[in-house]
Each structure stands twice: as C-alpha cells, then as structure tokens.
Amino acid sequence: MIKRVSIGLLLLALTTSCVSKKIYNDLESKYADLKKENRSMADENADLLKAKNQLELDGATLKSTLEKNKADYAKLKSDYEASLNKLKVLQDSYAALEKNSSDALQTNMKKNRELLDQLEDKAQALALEQERLNKSAKRLKELEDLIAAKEASMQKLKETLSKALNSFEGKGLTVEQKNGKVYVSMENKLLFNSGSWAVGAEGKKAVIEVGKVLGDNPDISVLIEGHTDNDAFTASGPIADNWDLSTKRATAIVAILSENKKINKENLTAAGRSEFSPLASNSTAEGKAKNRRIEIILTPRLDEISKMLNEIN
C-alpha cells in the first residue's frame, strides 16, 4: 500500500506545477528507497532458487549414497557367509584335533573362540547396517512421496488456473507447468499501453482471476517478473529505462494481487528483468510482442523437503 501511495504522489508531483522542490525531492527519495527494496527482494528470490537447486542436488546425492550402502551390505553378508564356512571347517578340524595332545587342543580351542568372537562382531555390525539401511530407505521413500505430492499439487494448480483464465485464451495469456513450477505469462497487449505501467481493465480482470486461485493456495511462493523487448525507452517522464519500466509493471501486478485479502503478502515478490530474458528473437515485431510480457511464476514451499533432507543427513 505504501508503494502505491508513493508512486501516486510521485506522479502527482510530476503533473502539478505548484509542488515545491522539497516535496519533489522527498518523493524522489522515497521512490529510490522502493526501487532499492525491489532489487533486494529480487536478490532474495535468486537465493531461494539457488537453495532449491541445492536441495535437489542433495536428494540425488542421497540416492547415490543409498545404492553404495546397499552394495556394502551385500559385501558384509558375503563375508559373513564365508566366515560361516570357515567356522564349519574349523569345527571339523576341532573334532579331529581332540585326538592330539592337550597343548595342541588348547591352542585350537583358543583360535576357535577368537573366530567365534569375530563372527559375533560381524553379525552385530551387519544387523546395525541393516537397521540403518532400512531407516534410510524409509526416509527416502517419504521424501519421494512428498516430492510427488508437490508435483501433483502444482499440476492441480495449473489446471485450476487454466480453467479460471479460459476466457482470456487467444488474448496473449498462457499457463504452463515446467521444472516443478507453474508459469502464467501475459503479453503486454493484454495489460499495458506502450510505455505505461497502468494495468488496463481487461488485464486487471485476468490478474484478479489469478489472485482468486492464489488466495486458495496460501503456501505458494509467487514471483512476478516484468519483461520488455530491446527497444530503448526514450519517452520523457519518471521512467529511467527498460529496467525501471519492467520493475514498475511487475509492482503494478503485485498491487492488484495485494487487494485480495486471502493472499499472503509475504509470498509475493516483484522483479524487473528488462530485455534480458527474451522468449523470442527481437528481430521481428512478433518476437518483440512475445518478449513484452509479465510472468507470474508459482513455486511450492520447500520447507518440508529441506527439513526431511536434514533429518536424513
């Protein structure tokens, strides 16, 4: 709400000739603070994405460790069986040596006792290893089930969004699921006029529909990214460049979503990507139109998965 008021005051200051320089400077300072805060939130989102990738890498490492432990268990079992065979041979030898002298008999009895002690130690080690493997396999299965449940949840979310936004099909809006996330992409022709960050009536309807779905899914992290083509921003006014424009457009979408009281504001992040994440070549008008867009990226919370990985480790 503070960001909207600040931007509104900034626009009022630029369009009203009677405003003093002090008020203008105050508004400009507030705007700079908001812009800095936006960049910080974008950095934080990048850190979260990096942490998610690390969690996925740790999961793969755990699977590899489990396979190695299984191989170690098989070797221990083989050693145990070989030791049993040796014991049988020694038992047979023991029976034969009973006919020999008392000293030789005592020596062989001592060796047999030592071997029996070794076999008992191996049996205990094998039992402990089996117990550890069983626990690891159980936790890994729970982790796999949790990841599968997250995937199913995101698929259901994608289907719900597609149904809610069906009326905007063919108007520059797409919904797709990839890399465990759901992407809602809206071309600027649905949302903004050229050089503007004010959301039009039709675009606002689409954003409100997205907000209704998000309100029913409070555990979803929401990243709103603004994108432009590579045409330099040349208009006069409060916009500095394409970075600035893409950021303001992302923030405008956040403002509309924030009107929905069911949405957890802590899950919302706005980011400007300027021209540096294109979907198509900027060499054609069609490509530029695709690149001028807002992307709403929905990511499941990974707290439970992170906790389970820590427990396994």
Image (cartoon, helix red, strand yellow):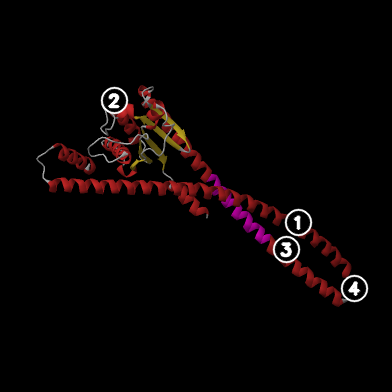
181 or 33: nearer the viewer: 33
Residue 190 is left or right of residue 1, and the answer is right
Q: Write down the region rendered in magenta.
A: 123-142
Say which mark, if any, is on residue 100. 4
Q: Amino acid at mark 2?
A: Glu
| Mark closest to the chain's N terminus, 1 or 3 | 1
Asked whether, in this view, residue 253 is left or right of residue 300, the answer is left
**Sequence order check, earlier mark of 2 and 4:** 4
Could you say whether the residue bearing mark 1 is in a helix, strand or loop? Answer: helix
Pointer 3: residues within 10 angstroms few (<14), some, or many (20+)? some
C-alpha separation, residue under disc 3 versus residue under disc 2: 78 Å
Q: Residue at x 28, y 46 (%)?
A: 35
What secondary structure is marked by label 4? loop
Disc 1 residue type? Glu
Task: Tell me the amino acid under the disc marked 4.
Answer: Asn
The residue labelled by disc 3 is: 119
Residue 285 placement (x, y as % from top left): 39, 26
Q: Work out whether mark 4 precedes mark 1 in sequence or the reverse, and give the earlier one.
A: 1
Q: CA distance from mark 1 to mark 3?
A: 10 Å
Q: Which residue is mark 2?
A: 202
The local crowd at label 4, few if under 14, some if 14 to 19, many if 20 or more residues have their Cα within 10 Å, is: few
Q: Within the image, what quadrant is residue 237 found in?
A: top left
The secondary structure that most of the magenta stretch takes on is helix
Query: Magenta includes 307?
Result: no
Residue that numbered label 1 is attached to: 81
* Closer to viewer: mark 2 or mark 4: 2
Instruction: Tell me the mark number nearer the camera, choosing from 1 and 2.
Output: 2
Seen as rendered, the residue at the extreme right is 99
Give left or right: position of 231 versus 2.
right
Quarter of the figure with the N terminus: top left
